Image: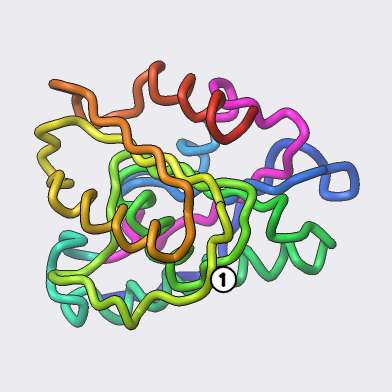
Amino acid sequence: MYTHEKQIIQAGKLAAHAKKAVVLLHGRGSTAQGILSLQRHLQLEDALLLAPQATNNSWYPYSFLAPAEANQPSLDSALALVDDVVAETDKLGIPPANLYFVGFSQGACLTLEYAARHAKRYGGIVAFTGGLIGESLAASNYRGDFAGTPILITSGDHDPHVPLHRIEESVAIVKHLGAEVTTEIYPGKPHSISADETLLANELIFN
């Protein structure tokens, strides 16, 4: 088990000139630098980009469907690191309505988990292949009001890591918290981010 050091890579607009901020969370085995490559495909020209790096390139050791205690203390440490990044945007004077989240795979799960535990009106959330974390989902973990925050969740119909039933459960919870959710499930899509997904994210979230 492990906890996460505070290591955050900045890219995009300088903070003093940014109109919005985007927190990008990489997948298991990847890096902050890797997820930042999405700036070539998403419309993020006017945004400060903040990508924290997971210790051991993994936000938590086991599947997101494992019992919650099996992924501790790493999961709580990961959530705390995301909270630190969000606090940095607040210090820069960027309001939640101009704050966006993007995550892939394990990072998408962490994205949804953090946002649903701190629901408010964000600029938008993109979860490329992810769902809320835990063997079962306890509604009491999630609170706040998304107040119409647009959320895009995408995946393949037979993804090897993220079953459709967990995406459906996650959608129900974030909708209950007031999010406007779009779900796009692609037949036969591999466990990766496709051009169709980034185009949809640009259309729905970063327009």
Residue at coordinates 21% horizontally, 50% vertically from top-left?
Answer: 168
Q: Residue at x 21, y 77 (%)?
A: 68
Residue depicted at 40% across the width and 17% down the height: 195
Tell me the SS state at disc 1: helix
Residue situated in front as seen by the camera: 83 or 158:
158
In front: 129, or 207? 207
Q: Is residue 142 above or below residue 100?
A: below
Rendered residue at 19%/25% (across/down): 190
Task: Tally the numbered discs.
Answer: 1
Packing grade of label 1 (10 A; few <14, some 14-19, many >=20) is some
Nearer-the-camera pick, 62 or 115:
115
* Amino acid type of the residue tagged 1 in the rendering: Asp
Q: Which residue matches tag 1?
A: 83
The image position of residue 85, as x and y in percent, is: 62, 64
> x, y (%) of residue 116?
43, 66
**Compared to 129, does 112 lie above or below?**
below
Figure check: 206 above or below 130:
above
Residue 182 within the magenta-colored segment of the rendering:
no
Q: From the image, which quarter does the N terminus lie in?
A: bottom left
**Residue range (magenta):** 38-60
What x and y, as percent, mark residue 173? Answer: 33, 63
Please state which of residues 77 and 138 is positioned toward the viewer in this rendering. 138
Give the quarter of the image for residue 87: bottom right
Indicate yes or no whether the magenta region holds residue 45: yes
| Quadrant (top left/top right/bottom left/bottom right) for the C terminus | top right
Indicate the position of residue 65 as horizontal and vertical percent values.
Answer: 15, 63
The answer to whether 32 appears left or right of 130 in the picture is right
Residue 71 drawn above or below residue 35: below
